């Protein structure tokens, strides 16, 4: 059996590596992966550059981490023998600031997502007005919107982020923290973002505890009890919320490509059309060449998948087109430490939509991760665009880098005449799928139609999670579908995944 994979991001590579494992287990299965870009990794792109005075920069232009609690990347890293290359964030410098009226306000202690769980930090912060603080405290007493019937889930009671947060905590809680933290980082518009798809635990929490504050307090208590019950062993790696790899996130993509077999991976050529060809499939490439196989895995952006899928199933393509995508850019800048005369013990800054700034956020990469820049350099990552201001992306790369620089000068206090030692812009055109209201019901229908097309599967971050582990697992599930239809059962699919971290 030969499978054609379209797309060389983490989803496509996850599919390729699983096919290789199936072949090593004795199944007669091969693959060809085609990627339109000249590189693999998709929106995982680590640029490793040398500094003129020695040392190097490790700069992630797309995703820079994954949630430690999601085990897919850990599992694959163990299979590849590179689990020891994983790193966590530097917790000693873990602080986040929010922009308010042009100033940086530290996120209050005790905030779990955007809900307060400690009274004194909430009372003393300047992030919120006093009326807003009282309104947030009312969450403790407000009743549930509705009690779910037996068997119902968050998907049956979806709600936009704006509706949910304003209802539970008030408008200022949305504008000052929930919007940049929960919507902005995902490229979503809060008035359209699906809570059930992005953060179903919030809806579950309201049902179980009747209050977000009570729910997060219960969650914190449970975590503290688990830490007491299972204290870290001597020499054990410290657990952090986010993980990456010492050489950046693209490291895992490269190792998967190596293990799957780079001789089966073609870059610089995309898929122009797909068609069912008898019992198999044909894929016409942008070069004019035609590939033939027994199955196709579509691991592209959802808008590209919609166009390629239309000749196969118009209804499926119509549904794929209902998933909107926003564009963004990442600006990486490194400065001399002497040009940054301010506290460097923090990880990130969020700029709410109400601030009307073109820079939506900043990560201090040389503080967040170990060994990402030479000792006397400071490495920043700035974010531009998204649904709030896609028009800014019409500027040239040079202008966007300068815009990011001037914004950082104004916000952080970098010296006005400081010039970056290293600068690189990464553009992600329509690269951020938005999970709008009732997204899960839409995906259920997409999967129902997908099941009706033999030898065809979708993968990527537009369906059931935008995180790196979610995308990786989607590629693996796609392989299981097309192999299962051919009567090939993989032993690893029958084994329950064990926690490896």
Image: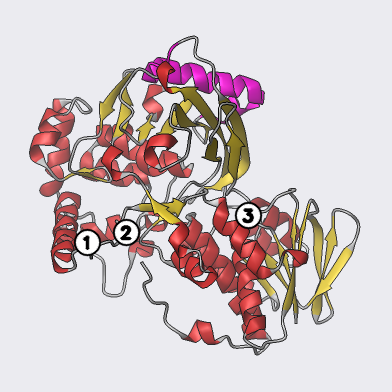
User: Disc 2 marks which residue?
Assistant: 237
Q: How is the image coloured?
A: secondary structure
User: Disc 1 marks which residue?
Assistant: 207
> Can I make out residue 298 in this image?
yes
Residue 400 part of the magenta segment: yes
Mark 3 vs mark 2: give the one in front: 2
Q: Nearer the viewer, residue 127 or 468?
A: 468
Query: Is there CB contact under 8 Å for labels 3 and 2?
Result: no
Tally the numbered discs: 3
Numbered disc 2: secondary structure: loop
Q: What is the distance, in whole Å, between disc 3 and disc 2 at their CAs?
A: 37 Å
* In the image, residue 417 above or below residue 47: above
Q: Quadrant of the N terminus?
A: bottom right
State left or right for residue 310 relative to residue 284: left
* In the image, residue 477 above or below residue 120: below
The residue that appears at 50% across and 64% down in the rendered structure is: 82
User: Disc 3 marks which residue?
Assistant: 302
């Amino acid at each position: 059996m030969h499978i054609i994979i379209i797309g060389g991001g983490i989803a496509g590579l996850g599919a390729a590596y699983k096919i290789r494992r199936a072949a090593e287990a004795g199944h007669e299965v091969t693959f060809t992966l085609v990627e339109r870009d000249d590189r693999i990794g998709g929106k995982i792109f680590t640029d490793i550059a040398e500094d003129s005075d020695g040392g190097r920069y490790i700069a992630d232009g797309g995703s820079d981490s994954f949630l430690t609690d999601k085990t897919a990347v850990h599992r694959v890293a163990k299979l590849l023998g590179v689990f020891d290359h994983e790193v966590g964030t530097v917790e000693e410098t873990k602080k986040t600031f929010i922009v308010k009226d042009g100033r940086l306000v530290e996120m209050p202690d005790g905030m779990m997502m955007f809900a307060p769980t400690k009274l004194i930090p909430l009372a003393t912060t300047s992030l919120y007005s006093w009326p807003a603080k009282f309104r947030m405290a009312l969450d403790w007493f407000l009743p549930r919107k509705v009690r779910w019937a037996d068997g119902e889930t968050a998907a049956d009671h979806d709600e936009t982020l704006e509706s949910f947060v304003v209802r539970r905590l008030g408008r200022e809680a949305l504008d000052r923290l929930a919007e940049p933290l929960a919507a902005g980082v995902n490229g979503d518009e809060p008035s359209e973002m699906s809570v059930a798809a992005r953060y179903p635990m919030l809806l579950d929490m309201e049902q179980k505890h009747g209050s977000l504050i009570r729910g997060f307090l219960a969650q914190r208590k449970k975590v503290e009890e688990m830490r007491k019950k299972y204290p870290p062993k001597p020499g054990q790696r410290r657990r952090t919320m986010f993980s990456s790899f010492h050489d950046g996130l693209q490291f895992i993509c490269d190792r998967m490509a190596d293990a799957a077999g780079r001789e089966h991976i073609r870059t610089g050529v995309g898929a122009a059309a797909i068609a069912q060809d008898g019992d198999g499939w044909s894929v016409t490439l942008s070069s004019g060449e035609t590939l033939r196989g027994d199955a196709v895995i579509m691991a592209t952006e959802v808008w590209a998948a919609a166009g390629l899928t239309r000749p196969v199933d118009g209804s499926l393509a119509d549904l794929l087109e209902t998933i909107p995508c926003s564009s963004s850019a990442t600006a990486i800048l490194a400065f001399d430490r002497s040009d940054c005369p301010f506290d460097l013990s923090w990880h990130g800054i969020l700029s709410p939509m109400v601030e009307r700034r073109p820079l939506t956020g900043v990560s201090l990469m040389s503080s967040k991760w170990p060994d990402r820049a030479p000792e006397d350099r400071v490495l920043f990552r700035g974010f531009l665009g998204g649904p709030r201001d896609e028009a800014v992306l019409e500027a040239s790369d040079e202008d966007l880098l300068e815009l990011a620089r001037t914004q950082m000068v104004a916000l952080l206090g970098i010296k006005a005449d400081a010039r970056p030692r290293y600068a690189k812009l990464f553009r992600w055109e329509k690269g951020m799928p938005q999970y709008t209201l009732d997204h899960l019901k839409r995906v259920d229908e997409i999967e129902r139609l997908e099941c009706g097309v033999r030898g065809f599967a979708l993968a990527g971050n537009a369906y059931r999670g935008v995180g790196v582990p979610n995308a990786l697992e989607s590629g693996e599930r796609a392989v299981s579908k097309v192999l299962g239809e051919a009567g090939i059962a993989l032993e690893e699919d029958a084994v329950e995944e064990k926690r490896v971290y």
